[in-house]
Amino acid sequence: MVSTAVLAKQEKIDFSVSIIDDKPAGNLPTRSPMEPPSVSIEDGVLTFTAGHPDYTLTIKDEDGDVVYSTIVTSAQTTVVLPSTLSGDYVIELVMGNWRFTGWIDL
């Protein structure tokens, strides 16, 4: 028998990578740019690949106001976003002086 249930699809988040420029010049990395993290979203749940570094996660509305922020430790593979969020948001992950920026739709 074929199931008629519709499965939600995880959507991979595309991140741009930038260096946070408020760090002293002597602390900027000299190696090639950092690879963006592999994160997907499904029904308001972010899924990180295992073994990722610690991140500061910030969700901002279209006016740039922070609507959610948390620390994502390397031991976490999922983060459940507040169900009160609805619409398009900027997602930022910060690791050291690297910033990864993308868009999500909740």
Image (cartoon, grey):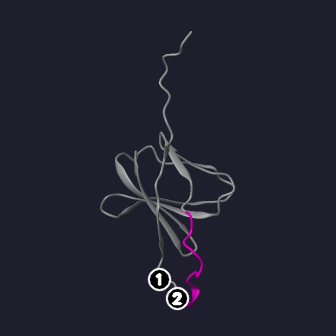
Relative height, residue 39 to residue 100 (above, below) = above
Q: State left or right for residue 73 relative to residue 38.
A: right
Give the magenta range.
25-35
Relative height, residue 35 to residue 8 (above, below) = below
Point out residue 41 in the picture as x, y percentages from the top left corner. Answer: 50, 45
The disc label shown at residue 24, or none: 2
Point out residue 78 in the picture as x, y percentages from the top left corner. Answer: 60, 48
Point out residue 26 in the picture as x, y percentages from the top left corner. Answer: 56, 90
Relative height, residue 3 to residue 88 (above, below) = above
Q: Are marks 1 and 2 in contact (CB under 8 Å)?
A: no
Q: Residue furthest top?
A: 1
* Relative depth, front residue between 100 and 88: 100
For image coordinates 51% across by 84% down, the residue present is 23
Q: Is residue 45 magenta?
A: no
Relative height, residue 3 to residue 14 (above, below) = above
Q: Is residue 30 magenta?
A: yes
- Which amino acid is tagged 2? Pro
For image coordinates 49% across by 69% down, the residue present is 99
Question: Which quadrant: the C terminus?
Answer: top left
Q: Residues within 10 Å of mark 1 (few under 14, many from 20)?
A: few
Question: Which quadrant: the N terminus?
Answer: top right
Report the residue marked by disc 1: 22
Q: Residues within 10 Å of mark 2 (few under 14, many from 20)?
A: few
